[in-house]
Amino acid sequence: MDTRRWVALLSIGAGVSTLLLKFLAYWWTGSVGLLSDAAESGVNLAAALFAFAMISYACRPPDYTHHYGHEKAEYLSSTLEGTLIVVAAGGIAYAAVQRLFHPVPLHQLGHGLGIALVASLINFVVARVLMHYARQYDSIALEADAQHLLADVWTSVGVLAGVGVAGVTGWYILDPLVALVVAGNIVRVGVRLLRQSLDGLLDRALPSPEIEIIRRVIAEVAGPETPYHGLRTRKSGNRRFVDFHLLVPGDMPVRDAHRIADRIERRLSEKLPNTYVTIHIEPLEDASSWDAQDVGGISSHRC
C-alpha cells in the first residue's frame, strides 16, 4: 500500500478516537464549547475518510481515459473538507447563540477537560506526522488534513481555557462565547482550504519563486541567443507541468535542438521534483514563430 494511504488511515484512527473522547467530555460537562470541539472532530473524521478514498484514487497511474493521471482527485478531498468545515461552523454558531441566551451551569469539568486534553494531544501528534508526509509527497490532501487537525488543536486549547475559566468563576456565558470564537476560526480554515483547492482545480500557475527558477534554468541552458516565449505552468496533485516555445536558429540540426531541450528538462527536474516539461521548438528566423503574445510570460487567450 502507498505510504500516503497508510498515513491517511492513521488520520482516520485519530478521528475516531478523538471524536469519542470529545463527545464523552461533552456528555460529562454539558459544555457547548466542548460540543463544538467534538463537532469539529466529526468533520475531521468525515474528511479523513474521504481523503483516504481520494488519495487511493490519485495513486492510480495514467490510463486510456486519464492521460495525465488522477492526482487532481486530491483537490476534491480538500474541497469537500473545506465545505464540511464551513457547514460545521454554522452548526456550532447556532448552538452557541442558543446557549448564549440560555446559559446553563457546567459540571464534572475535571474529568471532561482531562479527556479533551488527551484528544488534543492525539490530534497534535497525528497532525505533525501528516504534515511531514504531506511535504515529503507534496500532497494537498494530507496537508489539508494536517492543517485541519492543527486548527482543531488550537481550537481545543481555546475551548479548554474558556470552559475552565467559566467553571472556576461561574461566568457560564464564557462557554458559548468561546464556541463562537471557535466557529469563526473554523470558517477561516475552511475558506482557506477551499481557495487552495479551487486554485488547483482551475490550474493556477506555479508560485512566483518556482516560475523564477524555471526562467533561470531556461536562460542558463539555452543562452541569450535562444529566446523563448509562451511559458505556461500548472500543478496537478504533486506533479508540476511546464510548457513553452523555444526559438532556435533555423539551420540548427534537430539533434542539437533536442539536446538543448533535453538539458532544460533534466535541470528543471533536478530543481523542481515531479516536473513534466513540454517544449515546442520553433525556427528563430520565421516570423510566425513570434506570433504568440505574452503577458508577463503567460500566453494570453480570451474566449
Image (cartoon, grey):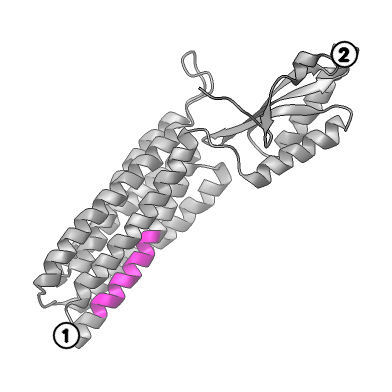
Q: Looking at the rendering, which quadrant does residue 173 occupy? A: bottom left
Q: With respect to residue 95, does 251 lie above or below?
A: above
At 39% from the left edge and 36% from the top edge, which residue is drawn?
A: 76
Q: With respect to residue 250, does 268 lie above or below?
A: below
Task: Name the foreground residue: 270 vs 198.
Answer: 198
Image disc number at residue 114: none
Residue 163 magenta: yes
Residue 111 magenta: no
* Coordinates of residue 74 in the picture (x, y in percent): 44, 36
Secondary structure under badge 1? loop
Kind of residue at badge 2: Gly
Answer left or right for 69 relative to 230. left
At 28% from the left edge and 70% from the top edge, which residue is drawn?
A: 159
* Coordinates of residue 172 in the picture (x, y in percent): 16, 79
Q: Which residues are magenta?
A: 151-164
Task: Name the foreground residue: 250 vs 300.
Answer: 300
Secondary structure under badge 2? loop
Image disc number at residue 170: 1
At 28% from the left edge and 61% from the top edge, which residue is drawn?
A: 183
Q: Residues within 10 Å of mark 2 (few under 14, many from 20)?
A: few
Answer left or right for 68 relative to 92. right
* Coordinates of residue 27 in the picture (x, y in percent): 14, 65
Q: With respect to residue 229, does 63 lie above or below?
A: above
Q: Looking at the rendering, which quadrant does residue 153 occupy? A: bottom left
Q: Which residue is mark 2?
A: 250
Give the main secondary structure of the magenta stretch.
Answer: helix
Whichever of callouts 1 and 2 sits on the residue coming sooner in the sequence is 1
At 33% from the left edge and 71% from the top edge, which residue is drawn?
A: 158
